[in-house]
Amino acid sequence: MSGIVLLLIQSLLYFGVMAVLFRTRHAMGLGAFLCALGVMHFLETYLAAVFFIQLPFGLLSPGSTVLFSGKLAILLLFYIREDAETVRQPIYGLLIGNFLMVALVATLRLYGAPVPLQGYNPDLTLINQMGLLMVWGTTLLFVDAIALILVYERLRSLLPRSVVLRSWISLSVILTFDQIAFFIGLHWVTGTPIDALYGGWIAKMGAALVYAAYIGVYLTLCERTTCEPAPQPLSDIFHKLTYRHKYEELLGTSSYDVLTGTLTRERFETLGPQILAEAFAKSRRISLLIIDIDHFKSINDRYGHVVGDAVLRRAGECLRREIRSHDRVFRYGGEEFVILFDDLAQSDAVSAAERLRQAVQNVLAQEFEAAPTVSIGVATAPDDATTLRDLFSLADARLYEAKRDGRNRVVGGHDPAALPR
C-alpha cells in the first residue's frame, strides 16, 4: 500500500473517531473524549522516535505526522467550539499526565536492572531515551497548543470569515516550529538523520492542510449552526489558557475592602501603574476620579460611626453599580474613593463623574437624614499627566477646588466648575 494512502487512512481514522467523541460530548460528557485524546501520547512519541517510512520527499514518522498533528487539530477544534477555559483542561491534563508517566518510570529505574526473563528483557536504553523524548515532546505539546490558539485568534482580524484557512495557517505555523524543535531533541537523543527533518516538515504541512479540511467538513456537517464566540483580546485568552486570570481573581478577592466592597488602596497602588502602562501601549486614555463624601466627619460626630459606616457602604455599592464592568473603583482611605475609567476622554469622564455624583446623592438622600453629597475631581492621562502619581495629584487638586467652591460638584480639566444640585 502506498505510504501516502496509508497516512491518509490513518488520519481519517484518528480524526473520525475523535470527532464522533467530540460531537457526542453533550450526551456522553467530555470524559470519553479527553481520555481518548490523552492515551496515545506515549505511542506518538515512540513512533516519532523509532518508526519511519520513506517517501519521495524524505523520511517521516506517522507518530509525528498523523497522531501528533491530529492531536493539535483536535485541540484547535475543541477551542473553536468551546472556549479557552474549557480547552485548557486537556492541555494541562496532558502536561501533568505525561510528566507523571516519566516520573513513575524514572522511579522504577532507581531499583537497578530488572530480573531477567527469557525472551522479555526490556530495552533500558530505549526506555531512557523515551523518557527524555517524553519530557521534551510534552513540553513542546504544551507550548504548541497555547501558541496554536493564540495564532488562530490573531488571524481572526485578517481572515474573519474563513475558519478553515485560519486553521490551516495556524497549524502550518505551529507544526513548522514543532518539527524543528522536536527534531533537535530527537537528533540529540537518537541521532536521527537530517533527512527526517525535511521529510517530516513536508509531511506536516500536508497534515496541516488535511486536518484543516477535516475541521471544515466537521463544522459544516455537524455544528454548522453554532457561531464562533466574539473575538477577545489575546492577552485575555492567554491569561485564561495559563490560569493567570484565576490568580488575578484570587488576588483581587483578597484585596476587597470589607466595608464597601470596593478594591483597597493597596490594589490601587499595584493595579494603577499596570492599567496606565497598558493604556499607553494601546494609545488609550485613562481618567482618574477622586470622590470625597462631603462633611463626613460631621456625619460621624452627629449620627455616630454606625451611620457613618452605612453611608460609606451605600456609597461604595452605588459607585460599583454605576461604573462599567472593566472600570475599577477603590476605597483610597476614610471617605475617599478612586475610580479608574479605561478608554474615557476628559469630557466624557467629567460627564460620567457628574452622573455618579447625582446617583450617589439620590441614593444617600433617600436613606439618610443627613442627605450626604459628594465632590469629585477628574484628571485624564495623557492629556493632564503621564504618570499615576501626577494624575492623582491633579485630580486631588481639582477635588479640593470643588470642595472650596461649595462642594457637591465635579471639577475636571475642561469643566472647571460644574453647577451644584
Image (spheres, rainbow, N blue to C red):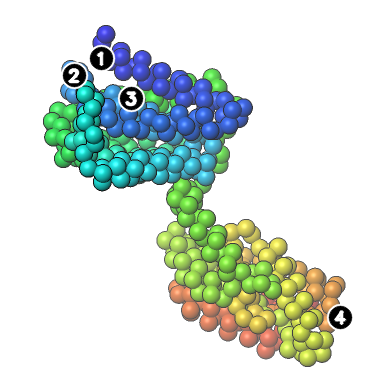
Q: Are marks 3 and 4 in contact (CB under 8 Å)?
A: no
**Residue beneath label 4, please?**
369
Q: Which mark is residue 3?
A: 1
Identity of the residue drawn at 44% across and 41% down: 93
Q: Quadrant of residue 159?
A: top left
Disc 1 secondary structure class? helix
Q: Are marks 1 and 2 in contact (CB under 8 Å)?
A: yes
Please rate how many residues cluster around mark 2, counting C-alpha atoms within 10 Å: few if below 14, some from 14 to 19, many from 20.
few
Horizontal placement of 341 versus 10: left or right?
right
Mark 1 and mark 2 lie on one chain; the one further toward the N terminus is 1
Residue type beneath disc 2: Gln
**Residue beneath label 3, please?**
66
The foreground one among 247 and 154 is 247
Residue type beneath disc 4: Glu
* Quadrant for the C terminus in the image: bottom right
The foreground one among 167 and 125 is 125
Picture coordinates of residue 322, whole percent (x, y): 70, 63
Q: Are marks 3 and 2 in contact (CB under 8 Å)?
A: no
Mark 3 and mark 2 lie on one chain; the one further toward the N terminus is 2
The foreground one among 215 and 53 is 53
Horizontal placement of 24 versus 260: left or right?
left
- Residue at mark 3 to residue at mark 1: CA–CA distance: 12 Å
Picture coordinates of residue 104, whole percent (x, y): 34, 43
In this rendering, does residue 189 appear at all?
Answer: yes
Q: Which mark is residue 54?
A: 2
Horizontal placement of 333 versus 251: left or right?
right
